[in-house]
Image (cartoon, helix red, strand yellow):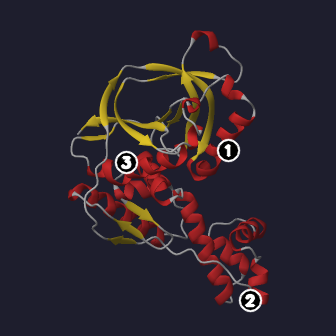
Amino acid sequence: MLIFNDDKIRLTNCKGVKIMEWIESIREAISYIEENITEDLSIKEITDRVNISPFYFQKGFGMLSGYSISEYIKRRRLALAGSEVLSSNEKIIDIAIKYGYDSPDSFTKAFTRFHGVTPSAVRKEGAMIKSFVALKIKFSLEGGYIMDYKIVEKDAFKVIGASKKFKYESAFTEVPSFWNEHISQGKLKDICGMYGINIDEEMSGNEFEYLIAEDYSKEKEGMEGYVVKTIPKFTWAVFPCFGQGKTSIQETNKKIFSEWLPNCRDYEIAAGYNIEMYSDPSEYEKGILDESYYSEVWIPVKRK
């Protein structure tokens, strides 16, 4: 399992060469970002450099590190800018431009959100700044890991649900907010939220469509605020999750992208879909927080 912290990545339960190739790609991407941190970096440029699809890389990097690529780059730039404001005599506006900000105002706002103080306060008063060191890869072997899954052939099927587009850079906070809004507004009575569906058909952009959905029923078609989507026919790798819904789903996704996909000899990701299936919380004493709560993660796959 890969564990990303602000200053290291630890590899445990390593099996085979393929996972090493995945780790090497991560290492190369981080090095490329660091070498070009003041340049106008794009996701496609980075992923072309390390020969990984943008969808796979963004999804995996985010699951493993807790940051989107753009958020990671932004934090690194602001940390480096803070260091330069503190230790150099370079003009603040020049530092702002160097790290990709077009105006003093936009730089000051971003700088203050990250460091908690303005650039001027750092320069004039020696106020403390925050560090955000580059990710590094550290290896340790700690035995094998068994991950349950099954391969399922499933015909195309329809779902109905609430749809919204998100940018990868903000999805970690905005998707949970989308769920909270759906629940707080009493919309579970309309759409029960059996599925959380991530759709990025191009697998090369900076945004994706997300649905809070349930199986299609003709009676609900045409309901205001909801859309009908057809999920194509795929072969799915289905991973069971046991435990509190949010935690178990997150841990399973991390293991899929850190262990199973990089190390799987027979299958690779087939399309830009990721489905989380939630069982009925009313069947459990503590609902989605119950330790025995059951959910699944579905990944479309194809044979290599």
| Residue under pointer 2 | 126
Identify the element where label 3 is drawn: helix
Residue depicted at x 42% and y 47% = 252
Q: Amino acid at mark 3?
A: Ile
Q: Amino acid at mark 1?
A: Ser
Residue 240 in percent (x, y) is at 39, 39
Q: Are marks 2 and 3 in contact (CB under 8 Å)?
A: no
Residue 143 in percent (x, y) is at 25, 62
Front disc: 2 or 3: 3
Which of the pair 18/275 is nearer the observer? 275
Check the image and report above or below for 19 versus 222. below
Disc on res. 177: 1
Residue 137 in percent (x, y) is at 37, 70
Q: Quadrant of residue 73?
A: bottom right
* Quarter in which the C terminus is drawn: top left
Disc on res. 256: 3
Check the image and report above or below for 238 versus 94. above
Q: Is residue 221 visible?
A: no
Which of the pair 109/95 is nearer the observer? 109
The Cα–Cα distance between marks 1 and 2, rounded to whole angstroms, is 37 Å
The Cα–Cα distance between marks 1 and 3, rounded to whole angstroms, is 24 Å
Q: Are marks 1 and 2 in contact (CB under 8 Å)?
A: no
User: Dot 2: within a 10 Å radius of its alpha carbon, few (fewer than 14), some, or many (20 or more) residues?
Assistant: few
Residue depicted at x 51% and y 70% = 6
Identify the element where label 2 is drawn: loop
For marks 1 and 2, the one nearer the N-term is 2
Identify the element where label 1 is drawn: helix
Which of the pair 118/202 is nearer the observer? 118
User: Dot 3: within a 10 Å radius of its alpha carbon, few (fewer than 14), some, or many (20 or more) residues?
Assistant: many
Q: Amino acid at mark 2?
A: Gly
